[in-house]
Image: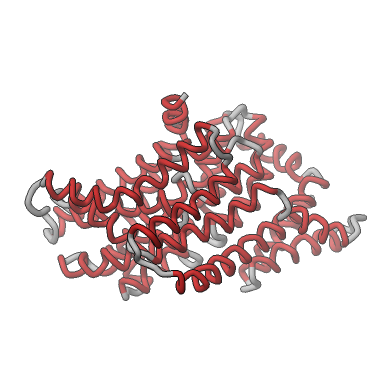
């Protein structure tokens, strides 16, 4: 009966406004004390330290720093110009451009918050001027910003690979096609909105000269994910080393080629990356302590017994996983939720013979929805601030986009071959 004690304790602390780090540690200690377990509390400290020691986690602060470098320069503006030249002629063109820009910038930043902030500051003024409601513009940006989590430099992918032991090389390629599927669903909503509202029926037609000019300007930035993924696939560098390559390439592009930032900006970017990394690593350590208790007390075995009563087939298990994660995401952001649930779901997925790479993509796509669902939604609040729109106004405009995201999630869940397309091509 430890599972109810753990989760009730955690949610009670989290909903009471206790910071996530302390809610995780409090639930762990509380379960030991209230449950009368014999584990010494010193083990929690050792598990906390052990949770942040693995070498692969060095990539987390490096990827965060690379995202800071690229989001502070003019990379976002050039990507938006490229997307506008390529797709701006469509109905709902500015919305489609927003989705495409977030998809491409997500490929170089790996951060949903950075994606939302960098692209939003460029597209929202133009969308409002064109006649889009502030609520829809903010809602679209909040949803599209999460496409970064399915791109090769995704930090949740890196963490999931560490927890599950799957190949980061394979996982980094598994999210590309699902990311494109989600982007297409969102673009469909944009086309519908542009025609229905009449605010954006498309402009002009596709101009090859403009596309070539924009491609030349954005080319060095767009080449970054290709270099990273190509290097991982070819074995030139490991996924951990790819984070250092991302930082070096980002510095070359932003400092030497585009010259959008200077050497004086680097200390500020380093501090920002350090603050974000410290928060992430502390939560990873606290989740490591909780994961140790879950493993030591065989909570996964207890949960497996409950789940097998409800779900007897793989498709039922996946449906249950999606439901649980969607509810959990209302209260917890993606990375902590992934750290909390992955150790529990992995052995159950293996029992149902579900591919763990596919499960990682499904979990990440699902938990990305948490970033734009109140009350936690990180991208939701960034988009609201940029669009100067109220949460209520954004929530009303969010429903068709949320429906598209959930529909895409179901396609990703039940068509596992989507996660293998790129891997099969390159192999």
Q: Which residue is located at x 81 percent, y 63 percent?
A: 29
Residue 351 lies left or right of residue 272; in this view the side is right
Residue 420: percent from the left, percent from the top? 46, 29
Answer yes or no: is residue 272 visible: yes
Q: Quadrant of residue 290?
A: bottom right
Which of these two is toward me, 246 or 91? 246
Residue 405: percent from the left, percent from the top? 38, 48
Residue 266 lies left or right of residue 160; in this view the side is left
Q: How is the image coloured?
A: secondary structure
Residue 150 sits above or below residue 283 on the image = above
Residue 398: percent from the left, percent from the top? 34, 60
Which of these two is toward me, 271 or 267? 267
Q: Residue furthest left?
A: 204
Residue 177 lies left or right of residue 37; in this view the side is left
Q: Residue furthest front?
A: 256
Q: Quadrant of residue 46?
A: bottom right
Q: Which residue is located at x 35 percent, y 66 percent?
A: 260
Q: Which residue is located at x 26 percent, y 50 percent?
A: 189
Answer yes or no: is residue 309 visible: no
Residue 417 lies left or right of residue 270; in this view the side is left
């Amino acid at each position: 009966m430890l599972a109810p004690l753990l989760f009730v304790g955690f949610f009670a602390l989290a909903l009471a406004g206790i910071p996530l780090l302390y809610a995780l540690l409090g639930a762990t200690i509380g379960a030991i004390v209230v449950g009368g377990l014999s584990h010494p509390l010193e083990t929690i400290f050792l598990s906390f330290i052990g949770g942040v020691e693995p070498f692969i986690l060095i990539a987390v602060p490096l990827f965060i720093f690379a995202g800071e470098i690229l989001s502070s320069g003019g990379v976002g503006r050039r990507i938006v110009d490229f997307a506008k030249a390529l797709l701006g002629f469509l109905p709902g063109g500015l919305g489609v451009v927003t989705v495409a820009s977030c998809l491409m910038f997500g490929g170089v930043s790996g951060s949903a918050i950075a994606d939302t902030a960098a692209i939003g500051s460029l597209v929202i003024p133009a969308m409002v001027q064109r006649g889009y409601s502030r609520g829809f513009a903010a809602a679209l940006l909040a949803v599209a910003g999460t496409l970064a989590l399915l791109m090769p430099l995704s930090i949740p992918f890196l963490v999931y690979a560490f927890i599950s032991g799957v190949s980061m090389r394979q996982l980094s390629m598994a999210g590309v096609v699902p990311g494109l599927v989600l982007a297409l669903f969102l673009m469909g909503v944009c086309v519908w909105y542009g025609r229905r509202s009449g605010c954006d029926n498309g402009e002009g037609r596709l101009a090859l000269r403009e596309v070539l000019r924009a491609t030349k300007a954005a080319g060095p930035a767009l080449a970054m994910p290709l270099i990273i993924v190509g290097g991982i696939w070819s074995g030139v560098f490991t996924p951990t080393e790819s984070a250092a390559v991302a930082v070096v390439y980002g510095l070359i592009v932003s400092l030497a080629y585009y010259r959008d930032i200077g050497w004086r900006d680097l200390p500020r970017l380093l501090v920002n990356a350090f603050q974000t990394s410290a928060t992430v690593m502390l939560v990873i350590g606290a989740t490591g302590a909780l994961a140790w208790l879950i493993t030591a007390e065989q909570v996964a075995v207890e949960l497996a017994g409950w789940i097998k009563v409800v779900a007897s087939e793989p498709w039922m298990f996946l449906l249950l996983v999606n439901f649980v994660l969607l509810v959990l995401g209302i209260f917890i952001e993606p990375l902590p939720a992934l750290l909390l649930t992955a150790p529990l779901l992995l052995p159950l997925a293996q029992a149902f013979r579900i591919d763990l790479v596919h499960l990682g993509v499904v979990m990440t796509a699902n938990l990305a929805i948490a970033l734009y669902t109140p009350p936690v939604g990180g991208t939701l609040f960034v988009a609201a601030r940029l669009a100067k729109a109220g949460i209520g106004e954004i929530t009303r405009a969010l429903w068709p986009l949320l429906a598209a995201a959930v529909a895409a999630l179901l396609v990703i869940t039940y068509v596992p071959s989507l996660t293998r397309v790129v891997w099969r091509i390159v192999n």
